[in-house]
Amino acid sequence: MNREQISGLAHANHPIKSPLDDDSVRQLLERGVPRGGERILDLGCGGGEWLLRALTAHPHVHAEGVDISEDALRQAREAASRLGVQATRLALHHQEAANFRSAHSFDLVLSVGATHAFGGLLPTLAAARKHLAPGGRVLIGEGFWEREPSQEAVEMLGDFTDLATTVDRVVADGWTPVHGHVSTRRELDDYEWACWGSLASWALDHPAHPDSSQALETATTRRTEWLRVYRDTWGFVSLILRQTSG
């Protein structure tokens, strides 16, 4: 079982692949598309959950998504069909997000929980800037350390910084936050329980499957890492940004 398959099973009951509940997602999208007729781009869209929610809430929005997972994009197309989203309003591209080019500029560029694909927060913002229409917004989600992490936590999750320094780096890069959301303890915990519980449930429901033992072992390991290594130190912030100048 590869990483993509494990991720698909783990996120079966939490399709927003970040520690955000439905109300937080709705509010962030409302801030990101205040007119309701914007053009949206998601860099690393996965199954297109952000785009589908924006499209169903706003019938005049048009959206594009980019991802390297052909299976995730197939799921996004199937979900769009079930939801009755017109094909003319959603375009999905199977390629590296860093290499994506479009004839359009976008009023909202999304990259939530996917900054690793670009090499970090600031490189992700640099990529988003290339696609942004004048006066447009970026919605970005990134981890941060709520308190001093252990070396094990840093090695496991990455070299994040604290929330204030994270925002300072964004501002120094030429952006102004116009809205933000720090995931609550409930959102963080709900996300982890959903991921590793979904994966474990699949393993228990399919005991004869050749990947069952691997899935259960992975769920157990990841749950233990969360509880013992980073639960009390790691946080997640979602920022809506506008360019300070230019």
Image (tube, rainbow, N blue to C red):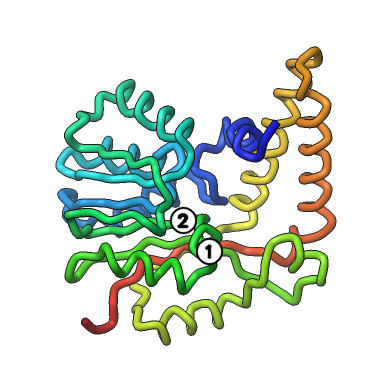
- Image position of 208 with respect to 110: above or below: above
Q: Is residue 126 rendered to the left or right of residue 18?
A: left
Q: Is residue 134 visible?
A: yes
Quadrant in which residue 176 is drawn: bottom left
- In depth, the one of 34 and 10 nearer the eye is 10
Q: Is residue 81 rendered to the left or right of residue 58?
A: right
Quadrant in which residue 6 is drawn: top right
Q: Position of residue 168 (x, y in %)?
A: 48, 84
- In depth, the one of 135 and 193 nearer the eye is 135
Tell me which numbered mark, 2 or 1, is placed earlier along the sequence.
2
- In depth, the one of 38 and 68 nearer the eye is 68
Q: Position of residue 240 (x, y in %)?
A: 36, 66
Q: Residue at x 53, y 64 (%)?
A: 142
Quadrant (top left/top right/bottom left/bottom right) for the C terminus: bottom left
The residue at which mark 2 appears reads as 112
- In depth, the one of 152 and 187 nearer the eye is 152
User: Which amino acid is tagged 2?
Assistant: Val
- Image position of 56 with respect to 43: above or below: above
Report the disc number at residue 142: 1
Q: CA distance from mark 2 to mark 1?
A: 7 Å
Q: Is residue 194 visible?
A: no
